Amino acid sequence: MLEKQLTGHRVDRSICAWFWEQVISQGDSFKVQCEQHPSRCHSILCSMEDNRPEKHTNNEVYVDLVEEMDAIINSDGALVKCEIHGEVQVNSHLSGLPDLTLSFANPSILNDVRFHPCVRFRPWESHQILSFVPPDGQFKLMSYRVKKLKSTPIYVKPQVTSDSGICRISVMVGIRNDPGKTIDSITVQFQLPPCVLSADLTSNHGAVNILANKTCSWSIGRIPKDKAPSMSGTLTLETGLERLRVFPTFQVGFKVMGVALSGLQIDKLDLKNLPNRPYKGFRALTRAGEFDVRS
């Protein structure tokens, strides 16, 4: 209710991000002031600018693109779905009342965007630019989705056959689309079916473990240059069962530092109203989200 009142009075939320957060969090304790005439409400907010509590010896701001890739690959190896769910995370330690403008080189790829309350809506609607006064510390500036990606950074090729009470499994992993950065923390997991009595699985790289919840976990790490990691072995089925009725789905994990696999690129970050020149840092990270390979 309080948020609607402020918006209805056309109060620019970015006038004082700190004060806005106090209003939203404390609610009724600010209700009397916020229900006053719009001009009075605006003057109250403006009067808070000089009282912004954040003062930092080293002015610095960090902007991170953090993305998760969701993908479904069918039993024929075809890419059924691939999309990115991402966030723009900001860690701000800026004195005074800084005014920031963040622009992207290719904002047209973004879908389903959601913003932190400090973001001014009109610059985004008009020019797809993020204009805001940041709260102090770490916060999520924006979330987004990028749909219909054409490729994944790695491939996982499982082969599963079953007969005579034995299930034979072979899985190969390699780089499909090199992102230009190291692909790290690669894992492949699958749930052992309830009808499996025992598993004998080995790999030529990394470690294979059967966890207490009957999950097979293959930790690969990085893909070596001299060989493609592979895992193979057999599953022994319960007595009387000739073959596996439902083949497992493999869940893939990975991490790539230094690149946003959606293709989103930051163009520039402009800062105003600061006593001295701040430090600006940028990073990107993409990791696997719900990445499933069917066998």
Image: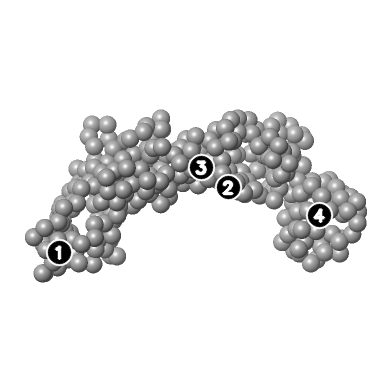
Closer to the chain start, of discs 1 and 4, is 4
Position of residue 197 in the picture relative to residue 24 (left or right): left
Which of the two residues, 66 or 95, is positioned nearer the viewer here? Answer: 66
Q: Is residue 49 left or right of residue 57?
A: right
Q: Residue at label 2?
A: 112
Of marks 1 and 4, the one in the foreground? 4
Question: Based on the displayed image, in which of its 4 quarters is residue 131 positioned?
Answer: top right
Q: Residues within 10 Å of mark 4 (few under 14, many from 20)?
A: few
Of labels 3 and 2, earlier in sequence is: 2
Q: CA distance from mark 3 to mark 2?
A: 9 Å
Considering the numbered disc 1 on the image, is that residue within a helix, a strand or a loop?
strand
At numbered mark 2, what does the secondary structure look like: helix, strand or loop?
strand
Label ID, residue 237 = 1
Q: In the image, residue 225 lies at what x, y percent?
A: 27, 31
Secondary structure type for disc 3: strand
Distance CA(mark 2)–CA(mark 4): 24 Å
How far is mark 2 from mark 1, CA to CA?
A: 46 Å
Amino acid type assigned to the residue bearing label 2 in the image: Asp
**Three-letter residue code for mark 3:** Val
- Residue 274, x across and y down, in percent: 75, 35
Residue 224 to residue 39: above or below: above
Q: Residue at x 38, y 39 (%)?
A: 152
Residue that mark 3 sits on:
146
Distance from Cα at disc 1 to Cα at disc 4: 66 Å
Name the residue rendered at 27%, 48% in the picture: 75
Question: On the image, numbered disc 4 is attached to which residue?
Answer: 8
